[in-house]
Amino acid sequence: MPESAAAKRKEHATEPADPMTLAAQEDPSTLFAGRGSLTSRIEQGKAARRKVPRAKLADCKIDNRDPIALLDASNVGRVTELIPIRYGRMVANPFAFYRGAAPLMAYDLSKLPHSNLIVQLGGDAHLANFGLFASPERRILFGPNDFDETLPGPFDWDMRRLATSFVIAARERGLATRDQRGVVRRLCETFRQRIAEFSRMDTLDVWYYQFKAASMLAIADSTEERRKELAVIDKARQQSSRSVTTHVTELVNGKLRIKDVPPLVYHVPLASPRDHAQYDALVRHFFADYRLTLPDDRRALFDRYELVDVAIRVVGIGSVGTRCYEALFTVMGSSP
């Protein structure tokens, strides 16, 4: 990008980008290039497999790495007083350690053979990062629900992390080695089948594909498994902003506020009214910028709410110590 154009973009960073301007900055030869035919893509996959056979992906020889140093390096930029909570959660059991040690696995995978078939990775695809959630249309869906580690990379990195998480969880549950292998084989077989199905589908159909709660029930292996899944789905349906608000807020001087539960939920300590004013202005500026990223219909909905409180929340295991905030919005003009 020319220097003058870059400066202009920076000067007007808070303004919505002009799609035509952005399109003009792209290399026209790369637009609408497509991904090739299904046959050519299959051949690319076979070529990648010949270069790095599947058996090669089983290699795991890592030398001269210091796990503690890698974990310490991942703490840079975190809230220092929360780091002990991170380590405390990690030592609870092997699966908890695995959840919090994504930097170790990322380091290991970077040193090992890989497919070189680059996709947009979830980046932390362990089984606890999959679950039920409501779509914007309030459909109950199942899928990945954590994307704070997303980066481009070889597709097998996500698969290795996911498969390993199944092994560790199966060991924690006391499953026999044969059953552990069976679980991972089924996982990989299902992944392969779904990718094969998606490769034959229309692009828009893949883009809008959703794995609904009903789909979970359809593949249940037994009546007992179906009963358990129904209970989980019913619980998910009962979750709403109102039910959550009941548990995580309280009235303070007649105003609704996020409830402090230190050290896991707390408000930023501010020394003076001036600090409060600066912090409030910073937060509101953040949400004003966020508002500009929304489509018009979402912006219209967003504008019906007002920000009333913000607090820091300690979440997960690997994310402990990062600056994770939760915000409380209420409908404008509503009373507590």
Image (cartoon, rainbow, N blue to C red):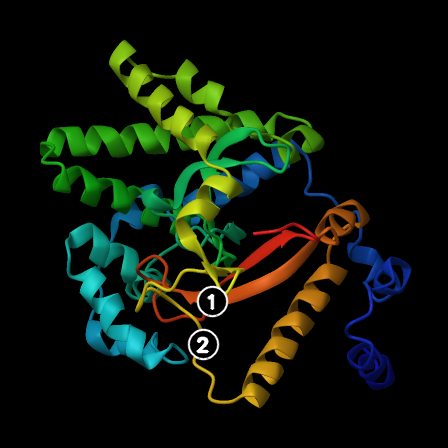
For the residue pair 281 and 16, the one nearer the viewer reads as 281
Q: CA distance from mark 2 to mark 1?
A: 7 Å
In the image, residue 242 sits, relative to residue 92, either above or below, namely above
For the residue pair 72 and 23, the one nearer the viewer reads as 72
Position of 334 compared to 50: left or right?
right
Position of 5 compared to 317: left or right?
right
Question: Which residue is label 1 attached to?
Answer: 311
| Farthest-out residue, top | 223
Please indicate, yes or no, whether residue 140 appears anywhere in the rendered image: yes
Position of 35 compared to 109: left or right?
right
Give the quarter of the figure containing the N terminus.
bottom right
Q: Where is residue 283 drawn, in percent x and y?
A: 61, 72
Q: Residue at x 13, y 42 (%)?
A: 172
Q: Residue at x 24, y 56 (%)?
A: 98
For the residue pair 115 and 177, the one nearer the viewer reads as 177
Q: Residue at x 68, y 63 (%)?
A: 290
Q: Mark 2 or mark 1, which has the lower sequence index?
A: 2
Q: Where is residue 62 drawn, in percent x and y?
A: 22, 65
Question: Dot 2: within a 10 Å radius of its alpha carbon, few (fewer than 14), some, or many (20 or more) residues?
Answer: few
In the image, residue 204 sits, relative to residue 230, either above or below, namely below
Question: Dot 1: within a 10 Å radius of its alpha carbon, few (fewer than 14), some, or many (20 or more) residues?
Answer: some
In the image, residue 223 sits, relative to residue 249, either above or below, namely above
Question: Which residue is label 2 attached to?
Answer: 268
> What amino acid type is highlighted by mark number 1?
Ala
In the image, residue 68 sits, relative to residue 146, either above or below, namely below
Q: Where is residue 33 drawn, in percent x and y?
A: 77, 48
Q: Which numbered dot is residue 216?
A: none
> What amino acid type is highlighted by mark number 2?
Val
